Amino acid sequence: MPSESDAVSGEHVFVYFGCTADGADLGRVVHQLPRSILADEDPLARALEELLAGPTAEESALGYISPFSAESREGLISAVVEPSGRAIVDLDDLIETVPSGGTTSGALLLAQLYSVVFQFPEARSIEFRMEGSCDTFWIDWIGADRCQEVPRSFWEENTEVV
């Protein structure tokens, strides 16, 4: 997990990618990389947009990987954290563009999404949607058996940020 000193400062947000260079479990370990943000930008939306764009060419050359790429760059419909602390992230239909199927790629995709959203302390849980549907995100894209709201504690217990 990011430390308290890594909290979003208004000057940057973080994206999180796997890395083939360190031999870590790609479904569990993500690397924190900064992205610049303008003062008038929504930090959550900006972080998700940067994640959906995938690693830069330089980052890829260093071994950073993600199921996201330039093809998914425009994939964010909306992102909001409700007063209750539930973040709702709605994505465009990425089923054909971004592989999610099973094991490592699906686990890495989710670890990256969780880490981007949970870098914001006000987010206590996340509901992901695809074109407004939680079922489409979880059942059709991820392959889960039901729609889920993911608590921060699940991310804290199952993801290591380096």
Image: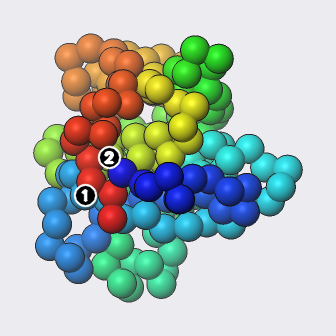
Residue 5, percent from left and from top: 53, 59
Residue identifier under label 1: 29
**Label 1: which secondary element:** strand
Which element type, helix, strand or loop, lies under badge 2? helix
For the residue pair 132 and 152, the one nearer the viewer reads as 152
Q: Residue at x 64, y 28 (%)?
A: 80
User: The residue under label 2 is which amino acid type?
Assistant: Ala
Q: Position of residue 48 (x, y in %)?
A: 56, 47
Residue at horizontal 43%, vertical 18%?
A: 134
List x then y, in percent, for residue 149.
Answer: 38, 19
Would residue 161 be found to the left or right of residue 26 on screen? Answer: right
Decide if residue 52 is in sight here: no
Tell me, what colour scheme is on the image? rainbow
Q: What's under tag 1, amino acid-wise?
A: Val
Judge the density around disc 2: few (<14), some (14-19), many (≥20) Cα neighbours within 10 Å. Answer: many
Instruction: Pick whichever of labels 2 and 1 is earlier in the sequence.
Output: 1
Q: CA distance from mark 2 to mark 1?
A: 8 Å
Q: Quadrant of residue 77?
A: top right
Left or right, 14 with reference to 155: right
Nearer to us in this view, 77 or 161: 161
User: Quadrant location of the C terminus?
Assistant: bottom left
Please state if 144 lies on the left or on the right of 33 as rendered. left
Q: Is residue 45 placed above or below 128 in the rendered structure?
A: below
- Tell me the number on the disc at residue 111: 2
The reply to whether residue 156 is in sight is yes
Q: Residue at x 61, y 66 (%)?
A: 35
Q: Nearer the viewer, residue 63 or 94?
A: 63
| C-beta proximity under 8 Å, tags 2 and 1 | yes
